Image: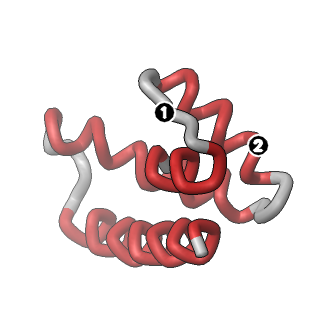
Amino acid sequence: MRAVAYKRERRCLTSHGELRAYVSKLKQEDPTLGDLWRTVTSMHANSYEGWAPEGEVREVLQRVRALRGRLRELMS
């Protein structure tokens, strides 16, 4: 997300709040980004806590790839 903001607007996002606000802005272009972002960020906590079963992590990996692809498109 930070790379998209910088590439498109030369903005440096430095906080979680700024990231969330930028996702909200991008959702106007692509409504799927909000759901993808929420799903992907939920796994951030899992990296510390380890609560998600393997199958769920694998499912989220697919969504991570989808989000990455959309963000790449937004940067082009």
Mark 2 or 1, which is nearer the eye?
1
As shown in the figure, which amino acid type bears the numbered disc 2? Lys
Q: Relative to the observer, which residue lies in front, 31 or 1? A: 1
Q: Residue at x 54, y 66 (%)?
A: 71
Identify the image quadrant of residue 73: bottom right
Look at the numbered disc 1 and give the secondary structure of its residue: loop
Eyeballing the image, is 42 above or below 20?
Answer: below
Eyeballing the image, is 68 above or below 42?
Answer: below
Label located before the other in sequence (2 or 1):
1
- Which quadrant: the C terminus? bottom right
Look at the numbered disc 2 and give the secondary structure of its residue: helix
Identify the image quadrant of residue 50: top left
Q: Residues within 10 Å of mark 2 (few under 14, many from 20)?
A: some
As shown in the figure, which amino acid type bears the numbered disc 1? Cys
Q: Relative to the observer, which residue lies in front, 58 or 65? A: 65
Q: Is residue 29 left or right of residue 61?
A: right
Eyeballing the image, is 76 above or below 28?
Answer: below
What kind of colouring is applied to the model shown? secondary structure
Residue 63: x %, y % from top left:
46, 70
Q: Residue at x 65, y 38 (%)?
A: 22
Residue at numbered disc 2:
25
Residue at numbered disc 1:
12
Q: Is residue 48 left or right of residue 38?
A: left
Residues at discs 2 and 1 in contact (Cβ within 8 Å) = no
